[in-house]
Image: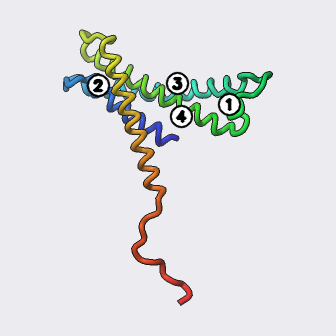
């Protein structure tokens, strides 16, 4: 889970910085700094929101018939908590990186308007974050496969 969030954070920082800079070299470093700061704030707020959502999920429909969310919380509480942390931290990363990059570019050049810049930066942040998390998943999947053995293991009984 931490690897996915880390890969998503790197992807979101890169995507939102590239989207916010929009080909201007002087805006790359402020966008990168803002996106990195926004990413860390997004991860922290995502963990807080994930914990809040998990608490609400447990308390939801406590008196009535159990539903899918309350069953997940009762059956495996740690899995439900990890899922909420993971989802909300990825959402926080995307929003934080995009907002931070846009604010970084605006701090470097006050003439830049924030509103038209935010939509393409958010799209770039989400796309590259998803791509980076997918690459991390492929890396984990390929690392789990056993290596091809060309020579048979030695026979200890000989």
What mark, if any, has residue 86 been given in the picture? 4
- The x and y percentages for residue 2 are 50, 40
Q: Earlier in the sequence, mark 4 or mark 2?
A: 2
Label 3, on which residue? 45
In front: mark 2 or mark 1? Answer: 1
Q: Earlier in the sequence, mark 2 or mark 1?
A: 2
The CA span between labels 4 and 3 is 12 Å
The CA span between labels 3 and 2 is 23 Å
Q: Earlier in the sequence, mark 3 or mark 1?
A: 3
The CA span between labels 3 and 1 is 25 Å
| Residue depicted at x 52% and y 41% | 1
Q: Are marks 3 and 1 in contact (CB under 8 Å)?
A: no
Task: Locate residue 72 relative to residue 139 in the image: left or right.
Answer: right
Q: Earlier in the sequence, mark 4 or mark 3?
A: 3
In front: mark 1 or mark 4? Answer: 1
- Circle 1 — which element? helix
Task: Locate residue 99 relative to residue 107 in the image: left or right.
Answer: right
Q: Nearer the viewer, residue 81 or 149?
A: 149
Q: Nearer the viewer, residue 82 or 28?
A: 82
What mark, if any, has residue 68 been given in the picture? 1
- Circle 2 — which element? helix
- The x and y percentages for residue 47 are 55, 29
| Residue depicted at x 19% and y 23% | 24
Q: Alpha-carbon neighbours of circle 1 within 10 Å: few (<14), some, or many (≥20)?
A: few
Q: Alpha-carbon neighbours of circle 4 within 10 Å: few (<14), some, or many (≥20)?
A: many
- Circle 3 — which element? helix
């Amino acid at each position: 889970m931490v690897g996915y969030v880390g890969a998503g954070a790197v992807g979101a920082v890169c995507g939102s910085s590239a989207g916010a800079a929009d080909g201007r070299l002087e805006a790359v470093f402020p966008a990168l700094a803002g996106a990195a700061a926004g990413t860390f704030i997004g991860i922290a707020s995502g963990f807080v929101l994930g914990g809040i959502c998990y608490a609400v999920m447990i308390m939801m429909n406590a008196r009535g018939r159990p539903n899918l969310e309350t069953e997940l919380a009762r059956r495996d509480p740690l899995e439900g908590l990890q899922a909420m942390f993971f989802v909300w931290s990825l959402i926080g990363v995307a929003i934080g990186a995009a907002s931070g990059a846009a604010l970084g570019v605006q701090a470097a050049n006050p003439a830049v308007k924030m509103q038209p810049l935010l939509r393409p930066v958010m799209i770039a942040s989400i796309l590259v974050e998803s791509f980076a998390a997918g690459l991390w998943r492929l890396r984990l999947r390929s690392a789990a496969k056993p290596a091809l053995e060309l020579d048979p293991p030695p026979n200890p009984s000989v």
